[in-house]
Amino acid sequence: MVKRKIETLESPTTKITKSGEQSNQNEESKEKLIPLGFDESDCDTIIMTKDKTVHIPSSFLNMMSSDSKAFVTGKKMIDVMSENLIHALSFYDPKNWKESDDIKHSTLDELLHISNILNLKSLKKYVIDQFVDNLWVDEIDSDFIDSLNIAQRHEMYTLVNKLLSNGYGAKLESFDLIETVGFKRLHKEIRYEILKGAIYRENDGNKEASYYDAELMELKFIFNFFDMMVYENRAVNIIAKKCLWTLPFHEVTLEDSVDIKLISCEKDLKDCVTIIVENQEINVKSFLLTNNSPVFKAMLNSSSFKEGQNRRIELPGKKYLEVVFFLQCLHSPQDLRDICDYPDVFILSQLCREYQVDWLLEKIRDFINKGRFLTKRWILKGILLCEAMNFDPCEVLVNSIEDNFLDIHMSKDFMELSSKMQVLIARKRMWLLLRNSDEKKRKMLFNEEDCGFLSIFDDQSVFDFKFNGSEKEYIKQFKK
């Protein structure tokens, strides 16, 4: 709750007369006000407010303003109450200035508006300092959100920073605040900082637990990752481009997995088709190709394609062993566990997509999404493959991640994922870290549209991802 000292704001001495000389109907209905003891004959500028017309010398306005040539004689409209305008003007006339310890929200909004319109830098600084100095925050409530919106609307980012500093570590009065219009109007960086503070407060509930320090460290690491994404739209990649596993003698090949004899046929057979890859020939029966791939079928069954005329198919840019392995998968059932242990399963999937072998691509996708036989090392690779092939969101794989986020972030495969998937994995880890929190709070923080963390990241889309599905099993794995 936001608390301040309260005093009555008194306007400086003013001279008021009825305006009978104005031609405009609205002006005729408003009082004519000559403030601060000015001589009416010197008042060559009229400022029309919500309730009165204020007459003042243009020389006084130019003296006040940071822009020395800002004002000439004439009329100006400022949509504020005359009381607040006079209070702002009196700041530059010390003999009439009456200091107040209290600045209400409505007054703050109008004083900042006046400061911007009239270029009153000194007043603006005073208003901000006075408002913040008499403000303390024991919980973030609707008044605090209103203050942030006022500061944001007037581009008073110094005030925004001071408010956030005062409110850092304060708890949310109600988690329903993050669903309010006022909260959603805040810039994403401001919403992010409020949500960050709320999550730290929720995690404090585990202070007495033996695992608190380790989980707090992971939470801080996750927020460091989010800071980079929110403020710089990037993630730090500290993974070495070369390591032991990238050296030539560690290169994994398919030589032990492929057997050209399984798919080969005699070249002089009538239905033989010759595939040329890396200047090597692969002779297979045409049925193997036409029965599995509509692309190959169109090539071989049409006289308009050269492949159909000479029964030769050239595949430039492809690798011989990969094509043989691909054809083996079309020829006879393969153990998908072996396929998924192969580091170039991406190539196999790409060949399936390129030649429209939908049944095998679907089989790979289902196998990966079930996640039954995937090793811990392969989970991130599986997610990477799902992204590369535009498979459905791999919920099972993401929920199978058991590693601490510090370890996950150090993985080369994690750094190759899209920022959207990286954020999803980080959100999932935070969801687990807050497992002892109220379910409604967790759902609002992580799993709702237009509020919580989904509203912070521009490239995040809401899809049917259930963090709380099979929760007991996830928590059991997490505790291990």
Image: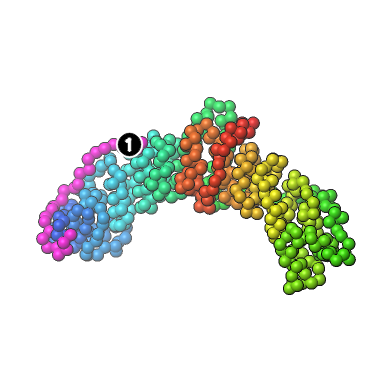
The image quadrant where one finds the N terminus is top left
Q: State the SS at label 1.
A: strand
Does 5 lie within the magenta span? yes
Q: In the image shown, does 93 or 471 lie closer to the viewer?
A: 471
Q: Report the residue that reaches farthest toward the bottom.
A: 304
The relative height of residue 214 versus residue 333 in the rendered view (above or below) is: above
- Res. 244 visible in picture: no
Residue located beneath label 1 in the image: 3
Does 317 lie within the magenta span? no
The relative height of residue 8 versus residue 327 in the rendered view (above or below) is: above
Q: In the image shown, does 478 or 59 lie closer to the viewer?
A: 478
Q: Residue at x 56, y 44 (%)?
A: 465
Query: What secondary structure do most residues of the magenta stretch adopt?
Result: loop
Q: Is residue 216 left or right of residue 357?
A: left
Q: Residue at x 14, y 65 (%)?
A: 23
Q: Residue at x 49, y 35 (%)?
A: 439
Q: Is residue 21 left or right of residue 468?
A: left
Q: Residue at x 52, y 48 (%)?
A: 462
- Relative image position of residue 399 (x, y in whole percent): 61, 40
- Relative image position of residue 19 (x, y in whole percent): 12, 59
Disc 1: CA contacts within 10 A as few (<14), some (14-19) or many (>=20): few
Q: In the image shown, does 470 or 456 lie closer to the viewer?
A: 470
- Relative image position of residue 448 (x, y in whole percent): 48, 44
The image quadrant where one finds the C terminus is top right
**Tag 1: amino acid:** Lys
The magenta stretch is 1-26
- Res. 227 visible in picture: yes
